[in-house]
Image (cartoon, grey):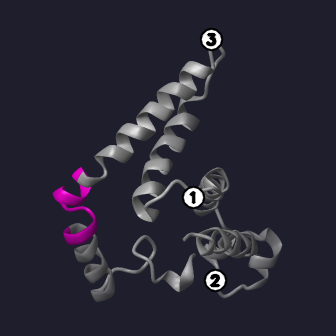
Amino acid sequence: MWYNYIDIAFSPYGEYWRQMRKICILELLSAKNVRSFDYIRKDEASRLVESIRASSGRPINLTEKTFLFTSAITCRAAFGQVLKDRETLISLLKEAVVLAGGFDMADLFPSLKILNVINWNKYKLLKMRSKMDAILDRLN
């Protein structure tokens, strides 16, 4: 899906995947690193409470708020800053989740290249990837 399946989320199980998993567990998800992101969680929680308070009696979509909350924490922990294009990146991630979780006939018949043209999912993902790359390239 992204970058020829070399990321940890979509790479096939094997030696490369095991090494990526080991790096994530030992480096990214160590207890010390998780504790170091405490200020991010607290700041994003206060932003969430403030956005709920600002709705002042109007109905809110709690699923949407929760998704934005967790995505904001993940982005800040990964990139070390509040992104200017945070909403755009999060909406692209949501769209990617929908596309990846949906049914795609081309997955059943990968040899039939015409199926990618018919439903455009592959092209939507490639366009989405270029938009995400542009956002990530603007990081300092």
Please identify, in this view, whether the residue under mark 2 or under mark 1 is nearer the observer.
Answer: 1
Residue 42, compared with residue 16, is above or below; it is above
What amino acid type should be assigned to the residue bearing mark 2?
Answer: Pro
**In the displayed structure, does residue 35 sit left or right of residue 137?**
left
Q: What is the distance, in whole Å, between disc 3 and disc 2 at their CAs? A: 50 Å
Main secondary structure along the magenta-highlighted residues: helix
Which secondary structure lies at badge 3? loop
- Depth order, front residue of 134/121: 134
Quadrant in the picture for the N terminus: bottom right
Q: Residue type at mark 1? A: Gly
**Mark 2 Cα-neighbour bin, 10 Å: few <14, some 14–19, many ≥20:** few
**Amino acid type of the residue tagged 3 in the rendering:** Gly
Point out the residue furthest to the right here: 118
In the rendered image of this protein, does residue 4 appear above or below residue 56?
below
Q: CA distance from mark 1 to mark 3?
A: 34 Å
Residue in the picture at 74% in, 69% down: 124
Circle 3 sits on which residue?
57
Residue labelled with disc 1: 101
Q: Earlier in the sequence, mark 2 or mark 1?
A: 1
Helix, strand or loop at mark 1? helix
Query: Quick one: label 1, few (<14), some, or many (20+) residues within 10 Å?
Result: few
Tell me the magenta residue range.
26-35
The quadrant of the image that shows the C terminus is bottom right
- Rendered residue at 44%/31% (across/down): 46
Closer to the eye: label 3 or 2:
3
Q: Which mark is residue 110?
A: 2
Q: Label 2, label 1: how many angstroms apart (C-alpha)?
A: 17 Å
Name the residue rendered at 27%, 88% in the picture.
Answer: 15
- Residue 46 marker: none
